[in-house]
Image (cartoon, coloured by chain):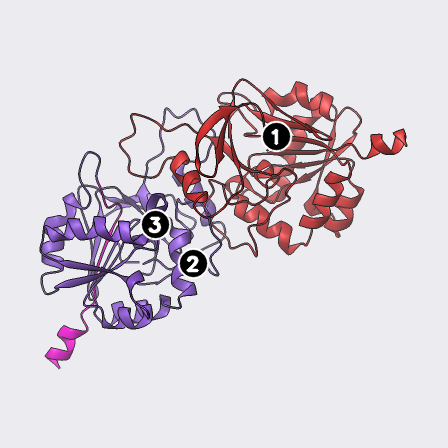
Chain colours: A purple, B red
């Protein structure tokens, strides 16, 4: 019974961003990742969000270089003939940032969204940054990204019972631009949806171990719920 | 023959924003609108983008108040039982800003996208701001808005042969945030699409009279085309 419990422990790390200003890729998370992946040798990397349109190979090389610092191997999901099997067999999974529309379209079209959810819920450690964190939410509908491709659905993994707004930015009181603030956009989301939204500032990350969910990093999260003003919190239990 | 030519003259005005910083709604455009709508008594207003989630009635009231200054009547499309007929019979059309996903979803679901395109191409004067300008493009895929609802398609009116990025913002050299700049996002669009994109700064607007297209306002446009660096231009002929 205890062994089965150990195997099925949910283990998820969701970061707002991969990179802090002036730092190298994943640098601020390396100590955390060393512990998070301590029982893992090889991480299966999902490169589909393709930041800046770079190739899957180039993206995987950047990730492999970062993880080499903590002695982990990285293999790109795009190198497998059967991505569904690759996810089933993965020791651990990392989904990198980029464009969330592109990532979600690809996951749906390859029919791996459901299997990814099942595997993570059954204990495969999952790490996401930015778009890779957004997809842990109920839907991708609080992404900041541009709809450069049309996904067959906005539904995502639902590993948590809220949506995530990665790279959350506070409204700028000196702003003279008429484009909507992040806060305004999320309020508009709640005119049509009931799912709570966690605004995750750069440097913040969410840790989930089985049923325990905690917020780490230097900042509180900005919480948006239907019909009430947004507020600051470290409690992500909804 | 000349009369028929007069009737079918295409007449389109597409503004980046409805409102400049510190000004009232449409104030900076009123002189232009007085000329643009000189032969029009009543403007049919499309309120579906619902900025901030306000009601169609409230949105229409704001617009009516602004247009009262130049002695135009405004009637909301949502007040008609048959929106398709209302568009067919409209003297002129104005689509206001808000959320582009919401606007496009509604236009597709009411099955008025095609009829709106036909009417404008046949001479019904069309004025758009922000989301209302975005939909004049080939697709809505260069909107800045959040995907708060799922439209059945990203295709829009195609009144011009490019896409529009309203509220275009230049990259901020002092930015310490890791979220993508507008320029980066549009470059990512061109990894998957060939349509040119016009970055329209606040205060800029596009005037189309039949085949003549011109950029007005104090700024040049930022032009993005596949495979070449973005550049400044007032020429929108592609």
Q: Residue at x 43, y 64 (%)?
A: A109
Residue A124 versus residue A219: which sits nearer the camera?
A124
Circles 2, 1 touching at the beta carbon (< 8 Å): no
User: Mark 3, mark 2: which one is toward the viewer?
Assistant: 3
Residue reaching furthest to the bottom: A1
| Structural distance between the alpha carbons of marks 3 and 1 | 31 Å
- Residue on which the image places disc 1: B237
Q: Tag 2: Cα neighbours inside 10 Å, few (<14), some, or many (≥20)?
A: many
Query: Where does the image place residue A190, in percent across and percent down from the top left?
Result: 45, 50
**Are labels 3 and 1 assigned to the same chain?**
no
Same subunit: marks 2 and 1: no
From the image, tell me which residue sits under label 2. A105
Q: Is A12 displayed left or right of A191 in the figure?
A: left
Residue A173: mark in rendering: none
3 and 1 marks in contact (CB < 8 Å)? no
Q: Which picture quadrant has residue A209?
A: bottom left
Looking at the rendering, the stretch of residues picked out in magenta corresponds to A1-19
Q: Which residue is mark 3?
A: A50
Specify few, some or many for label 3: CA neighbours under 10 Å numbering under 14, 14-19, or 20 or more: many
Q: Is residue B39 above or below residue B99?
A: above
Residue A19 percent coordinates (x, y): 22, 42
Name the residue at 53% across, 37% down.
Answer: B196
Q: Is residue B132 above or below residue A136?
A: above
Circle 3 or circle 1, nearest the eye: 1
Q: State whether residue B235 is above or below residue B193.
A: above
């Amino acid at each position: 019974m205890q062994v089965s419990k150990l195997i099925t422990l949910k283990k998820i790390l969701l970061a707002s961003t991969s990179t802090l200003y002036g730092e190298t890729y994943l640098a601020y998370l390396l100590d955390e990742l060393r512990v998070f992946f301590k029982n893992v040798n090889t991480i299966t990397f999902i490169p589909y969000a393709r930041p800046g349109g770079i190739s899957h190979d180039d993206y995987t090389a950047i990730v492999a270089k970062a993880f080499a610092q903590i002695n982990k191997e990285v293999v790109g999901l795009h190198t497998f003939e059967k991505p569904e099997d690759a996810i089933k067999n993965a020791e651990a999974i990392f989904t990198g940032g980029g464009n969330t529309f592109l990532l979600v379209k690809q996951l749906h079209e390859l029919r791996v969204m459901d299997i990814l959810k099942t595997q993570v819920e059954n204990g495969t450690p999952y790490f996401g940054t930015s778009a890779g964190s957004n997809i842990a939410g109920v839907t991708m509908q609080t992404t900041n990204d541009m709809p450069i491709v049309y996904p067959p659905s906005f539904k995502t993994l639902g590993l948590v019972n809220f949506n995530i707004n990665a790279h959350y930015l506070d409204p700028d009181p000196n702003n003279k631009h008429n484009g909507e603030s992040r806060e305004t956009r999320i309020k508009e989301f709640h005119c049509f949806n009931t799912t709570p939204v966690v605004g995750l500032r750069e440097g913040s990350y969410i840790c989930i171990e089985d049923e325990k969910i905690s917020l780490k990093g230097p900042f509180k999260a900005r919480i948006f719920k239907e019909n009430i003003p947004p507020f600051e919190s470290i409690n992500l239990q909804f």
